[in-house]
Amino acid sequence: MKEAWEIMNSISSDVSYISGGTLMQLQREQGTPLPENLISLEKIESLRGIKKVVSNGKTMLEIGALTTLADCCSDPLINQEWDLLSISAKSVASPAVRNRGTLGGNVSYRIGDTIPSLLALDAEITWFDGTETYKEPLYDYLKNPPAPAFGNTPVITSFLLPETPVSTKLMSFYQKVGRRESFIPSLVTASAYCCWNSYNEIDYIRLAVGGGANAPIRLKRCERFLKGKVITEEILALVYEEIIDEFKPDSDMFVSASYRKTVVANLIVSKLEDNLAESP
Amino acid sequence: MQRDQLVYKNRNRVRPDGKAKVTGSLKYLTDLSFPNMLYGKILRSAYPHAKILSININDAEKLPGVKAVITHKDIPGLNGFGIISPDQPVLCEDRVRYVGDAIAAVAAETIEIAEKALQLIKVEYEQLPILDDPEIALEPHAPQLHENGNLLHQAGYQKGDVDEGFVRSLVVIEETYQVPRQMHTYMETEGGVIVPEANGALSVYVGTQHGYKDRFQLSRILGKPEEDIRIISSPMGGSFGGKDELNIQPYGAILALKTACPVKIHQTRKESVISGLKRHPMRITMKTGVDKDGKILAHKVDILADTGAYSTLGPAILDFAVEHATGPYMVPNVKTEGLSVFTNNGVAGEFRGFGGNQITFALEGQIDRLAEKLNIDSIELRRRNIRKVDDVGPLGHRIAPTNGASDVLEAISNHMKIKRNELNNLNLDKFKVRGIGTAITMHGGGLGQGRLDPAGGRLSLNKDGKIEIAFGFEEAGQGILGVIETIVTEELGCSTDDLSIIIGDTALVPSSGSTTASRGTSMVWHAVKRMKDVFERKLLDQASKHTGISVNELQLSSGGVSKLANDKSFSLVMSYLELAEHMNKSKQSSIVTTNFDFPTTPDDVDGGHFLYTFGSVLAQVEIDLLTGKVKVIDLDQSISAGPIVSMKGYTGQIEGGGVMALGYTLMEEALMVEGKYITENLDAYLIPSISDVPFAMMTEAIESLHDGDPYGPRGVGEIGTVAVAPAIAKAIHDAIGYWVSRLPVSSEEILQAASHRRMKQWAKVEQ
């Protein structure tokens, strides 16, 4: 890690880290010239692998940033407890890309398909700035990316997934909508994790959305709105409006902002509707 | 119906080229390498429309590793190409008309050096107003893109009095249909190697759909006799019409001649997108009137086609669309007018279906809308208007008698009943709805009346004792080798081991016209029929002379000439090799050739076809009410095209064509804004993936032909693509009650329509 950092600092310009390289290949095809100097992180074994760790007394799943998306799809631990991540990883590109592409790379992309699922899972991220390793919620990291030290981008080292809340009634989903069924960039993505208490009130909720060139975000206002609520027809109608109001995506050549809003609201509200409280 | 219908017993065989293709061992022309080979790159225009003020190649020429840089000054002959009229400059001199226009080309030791050299070429432009829509190009003060203005071609057909027909109509539907610019998206992009030979001759190893036409066009550009140019054009990794016109050949040829080295050019996908042909985007307005019984009384059609910057086959494609504007229906009053207009968009040209796909989407859309208004089943409405066996063709011209239209309609009607029943018993997710739709079409084969459409072939026993069959056709994935193999072995009685098939090399094959217009299968069958008796007689005469056995007792068979015994068994009396040696010694020629034209209508109707195939499509779709996404669940087709020659080829064409058309309907669009491609690569230009395609597709072949039909099997290269879009559109309407009139279908439009009509609302719909 340190060595990679030093090499990076010894080269003044036109340099980049590279891991799987799938995104850089795509960008090169789209016209971004490949930097003259590439520093491969591939051989740093400590950045690879999936294991349970205890951090601040809490059990968490640590996923090395160089873990391939294919490994995220097939890992039994992820599949058992954090399956939103395996579902989202499986929606990225094609098998060949998933074999090379890494989770760290997908998050570095800022619009990677795994981000909404990581946000819904309350993931934390760790990164290295040349001297120290930092840890913070992924949500904060994406909102305020760390300032580059010495003009260089910090290296993402791992992701930490807390154990998911358990409840007798819970709902979680991840859905990506593209212009075709597979091997396709997202138009709209939504992911959620939601638990109910014994009074049938929502007591835990994460809603994350993205799609297209829109950086994934959490719908915090909607989360606050829903917390403590019992799902009724009226609440569904209100949260539908809230989502449309809070999510502010851009239009592009293929769909409008309005389409993105509507689909996100449809996806989330339809899942909530499945958990409608029984009429009194 | 024909009683003793032709059935080829080996039609289920595996394609001879199948294994090498699926295992990846087959060498395509773009895989070739030669000693001292250089790499070529082509500089395309930076702007869709501009004057060229200057071109400076000095720095590029000085770059180490660069062997030649060419501009318009280096063209020995005509600086133009185009199958109909050569209005596309090989290398532009003073003006560019679209982003694919070539300005210079480089040959260098490596691809990287060639790319770098392109960046060193300095071109000064003066930008001109961009005509990015045919309507803008037709405005009176629009800049003129060509000497004769911006109207490439005008075509029309008139019969009866449409106005009077509309007056008598009970229901009239008028709608404008818009269809996109589709890309062929062959797996192998344009490319190959051009090799200079002794005495100024040239071998061109580049895929094309008509080797002899390329030879003619190159001869004109290079100022060289055609005989000095050899075109090796097979095998190809797909073409679908896209490689019918010249693409990189002229640049490779000029560079090879200038450097005296072989030059390889193989376009990247992005280069292919920018410079390659596309399917014509069209705006089609149709007004159709029916009486109370659903009889169509009047049909008025206006077609506006965006042909891009140059002609290629633009005029012929418009003619085809005009011809097929009434499809398989008998309409007393018709007025069709079509315009094909030059713009600064990508060049539109030949593409599987050839104008039929666009017009059929509109026509079948009209029939379905009329059926809804009249409250008549849409298949029944078709039945009331469909052509009968001896009816004239769509331009009032005589065609080969056929009941194909009714046959495919009834076939799909039966299939519909089964599928509808299945659907009625299906439990679906509450946010999914399904619908079923059908559509039919007729499609002319061959180039049509008044167009040079020669065919031919050569049959011989070569010195190695192989029965050699030679055609000028190319293998582009369509399965022509399997077709040739089946027809020749079964017509002559020999085996595949006795056979040597030669195609796609102008040095070795006779001219047999283009590998286009669904003509290959038909022309192979006709050619073999014409040559077989003479060839058989030649071989058997010689075998008889050699063995002393009477000709009447001899026949061609697997391995050689056999003698028939009284008990009907036969035994080999002479192998083909022995016969070849004997004929060689006695200086007897075995060569038989034939030349003929593709059958056309006897009536003097420009472009009118004579042999038509018919197809009907059933599509079932599932619509996601939360996202507006349309998924095709079933895509089944019934085809009437005469007897099947190669089962795998036939099914492959219909299923493959169906998938290509599914893409056209739901996702494919080479999007251009102000003359520049937005979808520059396959990450934005989408073709269907395996997950977008139905798990199984049905191809039902109706093989019977009309009694006494002498024309044999018809080609099915295009028919499977033609009526898919309207069937899907009808299925969407069946599901959510909304008519789509623009392709590709927009999920956004569907979502909005579905929200308005069916969906339970949580809240107000976003507008």
Image (cartoon, rainbow, N blue to C red):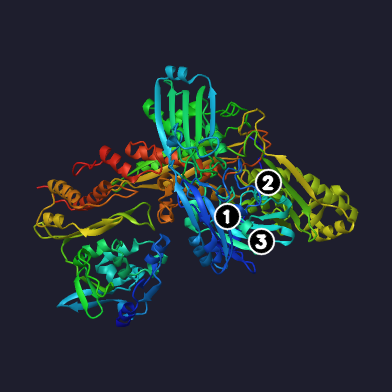
Sequence-wise first label, 2 or 3: 3
The amino acid beneath tag 3 is Val
Q: Is residue B289 left or right of residue A189?
A: right
- Pointer 2 chain: B
Q: Nearer the viewer, mark 2 or mark 3?
A: 3
Instruction: Tell which subunit mark 3 falls on.
Output: B
Mark in the foreground, 1 or 3:
1
Parent chain of label 1: B
Residue in the foreground of this view, choosing between B590 and B59: B59
Check disc 1 and report the residue beneath it. B71
Near mark 1 (Cα within 10 A), the count class, few <14, some 14-19 or many ≥20, is many
How many angstroms separate mark 2 from mark 1 (CA)? 42 Å
Instruction: Judge if badges 2 and 1 mark residues of a common chain.
Output: yes
Separation (CA) of disc 1 from disc 3: 20 Å
| Extreme residue toward the bottom, this view | A3
Labels 2, 1: front one = 1
Q: Is residue B61 left or right of residue A264?
A: right
Secondary structure found at label 2: helix
Q: Which residue is mark 3?
A: B195
Q: Is residue B170 visible?
A: yes
Q: Position of residue B641 (x, y in %)?
A: 59, 40
What's the distance in space between the residues labelled 2 and 3, CA to CA? 30 Å
Helix, strand or loop status at disc 3: strand
Quadrant in which residue B7 is drawn: top right
Residue lying at 17% horizontally and 47% vertically, measured from the top left: A241
> On the image, numbered disc 2 is attached to which residue?
B524
Quadrant of the snapshot with the N terminus of chain B: top right
